[in-house]
Image (spheres, rainbow, N blue to C red):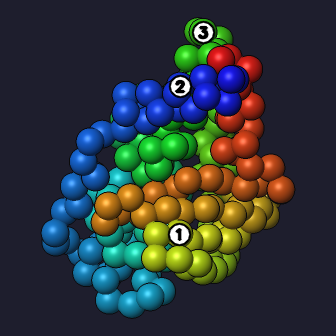
Amino acid sequence: MRFWILAAAVGAGLSACSPTEDTPAPADGPAVAALAGSASPGPASGTREDVYAAQSLGPEPFVRALYAQYEVGGPQGDRPAPGQEPLYSRTLNALVGADFRAANGEVPTLNYDPICACQDQADFAVTAVAVAQSAPNAAEANVSFTNLGEARTLTLKLVREGVNWKVDDVVDDGASLHDTLMKVAEAAA
């Protein structure tokens, strides 16, 4: 019974927290040209618009554009509300939204940026990116980087929703963000 309640809550969160259409991707611009030119593109300018544009180009261009933001000082501009991040899958957005609501005004479990596994970042440099597409709509990216002098490797589990690739899970040192947030959602149900 608890499973069905949780499934209904996640389903409701999916419909409430996710936009009905995929994020529009600008059709031109220097970052798109650089990303479209090769499987291992050079650094983009690091804007959210570059990341949105790269979402439809494939899992590797998406991941490289995602991390290019951090190499130029981190994501800029206003961040979307919890559970409404266009770079996350519908499932991850539903779990982030559930975590935020479960916190009830307190600090949520996800109180950091999962893409860099950090709250602060400086001297950020990507040292390696390896992407393997396991199915037409699923891929996994291992991303190694240094941040504040500390070397890290994260695994991003990616899914394609419509034409856009999105982050569905972040695994940091064996710990799955999806699984952590699912436990929060189950406890709140």
Q: Residue at x 43, y 51 (%)?
A: 87
Q: Secondary structure at mark 1?
A: strand
Q: Secondary structure at mark 2?
A: helix
The quarter of the picture where the C terminus appears is top right
The answer to which image quadrant residue 141 occupies is bottom right
User: Which badge, 1 or 3, comes first in the chain's sequence?
Assistant: 3
The amino acid on which the numbered mark 1 sits, given as a three-letter code, is Ala
Q: Secondary structure at mark 3?
A: loop
- From this viewpoint, which residue is outermost toward the right? 174
The amino acid on which the numbered mark 3 sits, given as a three-letter code, is Asn
- Which mark is drawn over residue 138? 1
Q: Position of residue 128 (x, y in %)?
A: 66, 78
Look at discs 1 and 3 and give the one toward the viewer: 1
Above or below, 167 relative to 120: below
Closest to the observer, 96 or 4: 4
Closest to the observer, 108 or 124: 108
